[in-house]
Image (cartoon, rainbow, N blue to C red):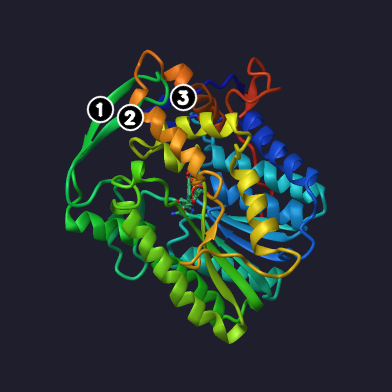
Amino acid sequence: MNRLIEPKVRGFICTTAHPAGCAKNVHEQIKYVTSCPPIASGPKKVLIIGASTGYGLASRIVAAFGAQAQTIGVFLERAADDKRTASAGWYHAAAFEQAAHQAGLYAKSINGDAFSDAIKQEAISLIKQDWGGAVDLVIYSLASPRRIHPQTGIVFKSTLQPIGAAYSNKTIDIISGHLSNVCIEPATPQEVIDTVAVMGGEDWIMWMEALLEEQLLAKAAQTIAYTYLGPKLTDPIYSKGTIGEAKKDLAAASQVLQQRLRSIDGQAFIAVNKALVTQASAAIPVVPLYISLIYKVMKEKKLHEGCIEQMYRLYADRLYRQDGKVPVDLQGLIRIDDWEMREDVQQAVSELWPKVDDTNVATLTDFIGYRHEFYKLFGFEVEGVDYNQPQLIAVPIPSLEGPQ
Ligand code: NAD
């Protein structure tokens, strides 16, 4: 049945998604990548874990359309039913697969809990059956509020809290633009442990060990996971908070993987990405106001990037450079947050931060741009889409249809 679809926002998520808008988002990202120079020495067979939205989706698009890679994408998304639209990531995956197939590129998807043994086994079987191994890049881009541990069945929930002391600062309502003060209580030691269990590196190691054990990785295969560091301003809620502890654990996992991958001359990396509007970042208090400011400053300085520009730069200027070198910082991290962290950019943000209030938020920050990007995540406010046109909400993901 066709119907008109409107955004229904609850807190920091939108419970509806627009199929045509989501498809257009994907097509625009493909258009950007195909307008850039091809990544000549790029990967050929790429497994993307967390492939349906944000950084993972952009990573998949760059692999496929920038390097002509075959891709398998793993994600957890909701199909449409009688009452509800599918989730945005479902529509993105459907549009991506269709476009990839039209371009003659292999693309298959697995929808389910990436933390589970069953989904890892499904991915392994598919890789064996279709590729016979030889995966040369594994992208780990999950952002999840919970994880069921595959061995113990314990359900861990991640939180976004400071550690040690309560933290107060300004925050913004992402729809009304209203500013308020938020005070977040410090996490208990158990909440820190739980967040590390969800967003830390254990599951990444489990994926890579499963692939190694089955000999499905190519010689010199690479794997990469994403992190955020950010400025002092967001430290209490990010780098020094529960999520920061999880990210330290992820970085430690990259060291473990670096050792494990030696046998195949492989490498494990962490890339520090820029703060961007995604479903995951909208959930972090204070961060949306910081992003509204960073967007304003970076757009004015012509340094603004979205997920796709960041991921293209990650492949073209870092992972797959002509000279074969992967530039890293003193801690061994790949920095594509370099423009966000530029001194002049951060200086401008710290000067603006204390001045922002309800009366000037629309002019001092790019809150309007933030909100627009937020709606776009779900396929709304996408230029060129006719929202008066009724939509078929049941859109198939080609590889999830019929016999697998
Ligand atoms: P996102 O919410 O846009 O995407 C998350 C992805 O994970 C989706 O594809 C979703 O389907 C998948 N997923 C979630 N739970 C799953 C499960 N149990 N099984 C299978 N798939 C599951 O998130 P994002 O912002 O793109 O974040 C991706 C990574 O990038 C995270 O590690 C995040 O910390 C990091 N990062 C984000 C930012 C930012 O500003 N958004 C900045 C730097 C780094």
* Residue drawn at point x = 46 percent, y = 67 percent: 331
- Do labels 2 and 3 touch, CB within 8 Å? no
User: Percent from the top left, x then y, of residue 37?
Assistant: 80, 51
> Which quadrant of the structure image shows residue 25?
top right
**Among the two numbered marks 2 and 1 on one chain, the one whose residue lies closer to the N terminus:** 2
* 358 to the left or right of 50: left
Disc 2: which residue: 171
User: Percent from the top left, x then y, of residue 143?
Assistant: 44, 51
Q: Nearer the viewer, mark 3 or mark 1?
A: 3
**Among the two numbered marks 3 and 1 on one chain, the one whose residue lies closer to the N terminus:** 1
**Figure check: 260 above or below 394:** below
> Label 2 sits on what residue type?
Thr
User: Could you tell me which secondary element the residue under label 1 belongs to?
Assistant: strand
User: Percent from the top left, x then y, of residue 199?
Assistant: 38, 57
> Which quadrant of the structure image shows residue 179?
top left
Q: Dot 3 surroundings within 10 Å: few (below 14), some, or many (20 or more)?
A: many
Disc 1: which residue: 181
* Residue drawn at point x = 35 percent, y = 59 percent: 246
Disc 3: which residue: 365
**Figure check: 56 above or below 348:** below
Q: Dot 1 surroundings within 10 Å: few (below 14), some, or many (20 or more)?
A: few
> Label 3 sits on what residue type?
Thr
* 183 to the left or right of 138: left
**Among the two numbered marks 2 and 3 on one chain, the one whose residue lies closer to the N terminus:** 2
* Residue projecting furthest to the bottom: 263
> Label 1 sits on what residue type?
Asn
User: Could you tell me which secondary element the residue under label 3 belongs to?
Assistant: loop
